[in-house]
Image (cartoon, rainbow, N blue to C red):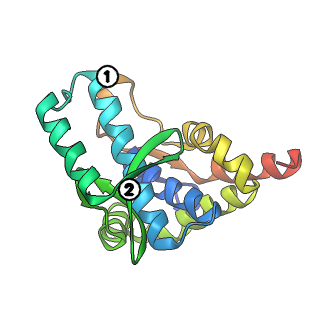
């Protein structure tokens, strides 16, 4: 199977890249989009991990400490792709927070390159075409639903946790074509 047909990969990097592409389409700078993309994927993984019993919520004292530190940093919350993302505005733009640390675009670029390897350009291009098939407003409303349709298929529950599945680039192209036909 060629990369044009599909790429075997875990869901987290796919969601990271997709969320970054969505953020760019919505007008965020590339560096901001990468930070937001990583935050969406991290929050989604934490949520699913808790549902599966893999992760436990942080103790209340730790959550309160993080909240106090974020407040002291001047952080705020940004609604994006169905998540409330803690972020700060720096001289470089919006940066999502992981705990109390800003998520740097360089770390996200390195992460994506390590996961997608040589397939990153073609996957990014496929996702960008899908995002461009929608107006920014429609994309914002549909972004997570689209991800649920395009994400790699893995076994349900704990059996699928951390497993790679096939990211079907043909399916992504079909989703873009369907949006174009529907005039999304």
Relative to 42, residue 95 above or below = below
3D distance between C-alphas at marks 2 and 1:
25 Å
Q: Is residue 116 left or right of residue 111?
A: right
Closer to the observer: label 2 or label 1? 2
Residue 76: give x, y in percent of width and height.
Answer: 40, 51
Relative to 96, residue 81 above or below = above
Residue in view at x 29 percent, y 40 percent: 162
Residue in view at x 62 percent, y 66 percent: 27
Q: Is residue 153 left or right of residue 133?
A: left
Residue to which mark 2 is pinned: 87
Badge 2 density bin: few <14, some 14–19, many ≥20, Cα 10 Å: many
Mark 1 secondary-structure assignment: helix
Residue to which mark 1 is pinned: 51
Badge 1 density bin: few <14, some 14–19, many ≥20, Cα 10 Å: few
Of residue 65 and residue 17, the one placed in the foreground of this image is 65
Residue 104: give x, y in percent of width and height.
Answer: 32, 68
Of residue 7 and residue 81, the one placed in the foreground of this image is 81
Report whether residue 38 is seen: yes
Of residue 165 and residue 53, the one placed in the foreground of this image is 53
* First in residue order: circle 2 vs circle 1: 1
Residue 54: give x, y in percent of width and height.
Answer: 21, 27
Mark 2 secondary-structure assignment: strand
């Amino acid at each position: 199977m060629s990369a044009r047909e599909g790429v075997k990969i875990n869901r987290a990097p796919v969601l990271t890249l997709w969320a970054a592409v969505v953020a760019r389409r919505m007008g965020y700078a590339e560096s901001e989009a990468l930070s937001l993309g990583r935050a969406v994927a991290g929050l989604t993984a934490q949520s699913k991990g808790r549902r599966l019993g893999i992760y436990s919520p942080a103790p209340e004292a730790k959550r309160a400490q993080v909240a106090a530190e974020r407040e002291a940093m001047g952080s705020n919350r940004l609604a994006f792709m169905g998540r409330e993302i803690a972020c700060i505005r720096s001289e470089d733009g919006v940066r999502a927070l992981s705990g109390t640390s800003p998520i740097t675009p360089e770390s996200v670029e390195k992460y994506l390159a390590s996961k997608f390897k040589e397939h990153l350009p073609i996957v990014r291009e496929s996702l960008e075409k899908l995002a461009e098939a929608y107006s920014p407003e429609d994309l914002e409303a549909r972004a997570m639903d689209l991800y649920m349709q395009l994400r790699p298929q893995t076994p349900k529950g704990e059996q699928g946790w951390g497993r790679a599945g096939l990211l079907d680039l043909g399916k992504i192209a079909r989703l873009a074509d369907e949006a174009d036909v529907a005039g999304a």
